Amino acid sequence: MTTLTMRLVRGDFIVTGPDIAPMKFKSRPEARDWCKTHHPGSPITEIGPGGKRAPPKKRERPGREG
């Protein structure tokens, strides 16, 4: 099973994987549909603005106030 990576680059959605050439799409639904059609059951990792990956949490430093 291939893990696919989808990222937003300059307004286009790029889908990459270890055994596929990068594919460019204009919309997220179009890219997800292509992934589901050509690689059914493969997990899709979304990176970038609007993706499902949460932003890193900021840690508070002890001893720092106001």
Image: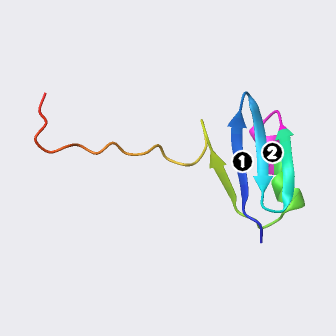
Mark number displayed over residue 6:
1
* Residue 28 locus on image (x, y percent): 75, 40
Quadrant location, the C terminus: top left
Determine whether label 1 and label 2 are within 8 Å by CB: yes
Residue type of the residue flagged with mark 2: Ala
- Residue found 20% across the figure and 43% down from its top: 61
The local crowd at label 1, few if under 14, some if 14 to 19, many if 20 or more residues have their Cα within 10 Å, is many
The local crowd at label 2, few if under 14, some if 14 to 19, many if 20 or more residues have their Cα within 10 Å, is many
- For label 2, the residue is 31
The residues colored magenta run 25-32
Q: Quadrant of residue 12?
A: top right
Front position in the image: 4 or 18: 18
* First of labels 1, 2 by sequence position: 1
- Name the main secondary structure of what is drawn in magenta: helix
Which element carries disc 2, helix, strand or loop? helix
Front position in the image: 36 or 19: 19
> Does the magenta run of residues contain 20?
no
Mark whose residue sits in front, 1 or 2: 1
Horizontal placement of 5 versus 63: left or right?
right
* Residue 19 locus on image (x, y percent): 84, 62
- Residue found 88% across the figure and 58% down from its top: 37
Horizontal placement of 55 versus 63: left or right?
right
Which element carries disc 1, helix, strand or loop? strand
